Amino acid sequence: MCVMRTSVREAYDAAGWPSSATDPVLALARRLRAGGVPVSTAEVIDGARALTQIEVSDRAQVRAALRVSLVKDPDHDDVFDLAFEALFPTPPPPGSAGGGGRPDGSAPAAAVIAPADEAELLAEALIAGDDSEVGRLLGDAVERWAGAEDGRTVEHHVQRVLRQVDLGRLYRRLLQPDPDADPLQRALRATETDQWVEEIRRRIEAMVAALLGERGGLPPRVPDTLADTPLLRAGPDDLVALRTAVRPLGVPPRVADQAVLEAYEAQAEFRGRLLEAGAAALATLGEHDELGIVLVGRPYNIYDAGVNMDIPAKLRRYYGVNIIPLDFLPLWGEDTHEVTPNMFWNYGRKILQAAKVVTKHPNLHIIYMTNFKCGPDSYVKHFIRAASPEPFLVLQFDEHTNDAGAMTRCEAYLDSKGFLRWWVREDKKLVSK
């Protein structure tokens, strides 16, 4: 994608066109490719050139030019229509601007901010650095859209608010190209926008939890309809892409949609079983005053026996260690804002949440599994001590690592924590008293 972006902008520069004009075409190409539509660099350049030959203020001309340039298969029309509408929304009908009147010209019963207006107001407040206004807007959104049905989890209500706030629209608004910005400024704005959107997501979660009076540990609710599907994980683009992918197999759209619902049901059931097993393990350790190791890290490091040389199983087999991976812990509701207010990576936040859970259980200790040259982990691990002050072990894997050295470090760590010599732990207890 970097090569494609560079090629398109070089083509613009060679023709004397402003480089900022490439952004909409590139954004559309990215969405099409994510939806399974093959879009080459040459086709993107064709689309950019086509826009110079039409009246770009005419939405129909823009759509036709980009459709002809970027889509070659009629089966991909659904994906194109959805992607184009997301990036170039249909303008409101005449007379609807300003919020609000009814078709008969009468005033609405109460002033309600539309999602598009909400995104615009949020964007303006974020750019202006007005945190109080951001908080007010988010509080209003939670009050209007969270709902309070019995038996629903915090996550369900959070998803309702996030869909109405429309983070996708907010993201596009914050990334509107600035013709006066240089490439570095645009890159910094993109990073800042990612942090803003994640901060909004976190604040909405906290507000909803406070509103409903619920606190962590509940598994995600199984969606009943596509309207309840967490669209931040599987958006409309993904659903259309799935329909397109299975259409040649003769699978009707309703069957594809049902497959998505059943997939979420299976995933929610699986997560529920993980949390139940983790709760049982914590209860057993507490009942018998046993020590445990919490494995933190990314799934491909802590679960792949080839990557981690099967060290978790060896710790259990050779030393009888009780192992609990972070996905078995009740992370929902663990606020990491005081550790770092803008953790960019989702798994980085989960790792810090797991560290905070460990802090609540003195019999738990951390082994952080990472791999060589993992940039995010090199950043995240420096915040572990802020979330959990006790010393922890970091195991870094690469293709040259052998288990002898890793197991030696594990043995030393276990010994220092009282896993291997129980009397050392008992002595520490007496000293602490």
Image (cartoon, rainbow, N blue to C red):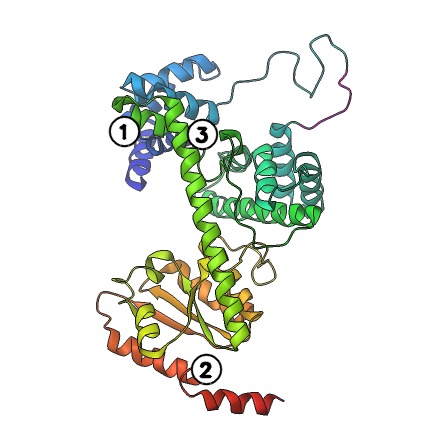
**Pointer 2: residues within 10 angstroms few (<14), some, or many (20+)?**
some
Q: Position of residue 233 (x, y in %)?
A: 45, 40
Say if mark 3 contacts mark 2, CB within 8 Å.
no
Q: Which residues are magenta?
A: 107-113
Does residue 336 appear to the left or right of 56 in the view shown? right
Q: Quadrant of residue 53?
A: top left
Secondary structure, mark 3, is helix
The three-letter code of the residue at mark 1 reads: Pro
Label 1 belongs to which residue? 38
Whether residue 35 is visible here, answered yes or no, is yes
As drawn, the label of residue 236 is 3
Q: Position of residue 316 (x, y in %)?
A: 35, 73
Q: Position of residue 423 (x, y in %)?
A: 47, 91
Disc number lying in front (1 or 2)? 2
The answer for how far apart the CA atoms under marks 1 and 3 are is 18 Å
389 relative to 214, above or below? below
Q: Earlier in the sequence, mark 1 or mark 2?
A: 1
Q: Quadrant of residue 261?
A: top left
18 relative to 343, above or below? above
Secondary structure, mark 2, is loop
Quarter of the rendering occupied by the C terminus: bottom right
204 relative to 409, above or below? above
**Pointer 1: residues within 10 angstroms few (<14), some, or many (20+)?**
some
Closer to us: 282 or 397: 282
The answer for how far apart the CA atoms under marks 3 and 2 are is 49 Å
379 drawn magenta: no
Label 2 belongs to which residue? 417
Does residue 252 appear to the left or right of 223 in the view shown? left
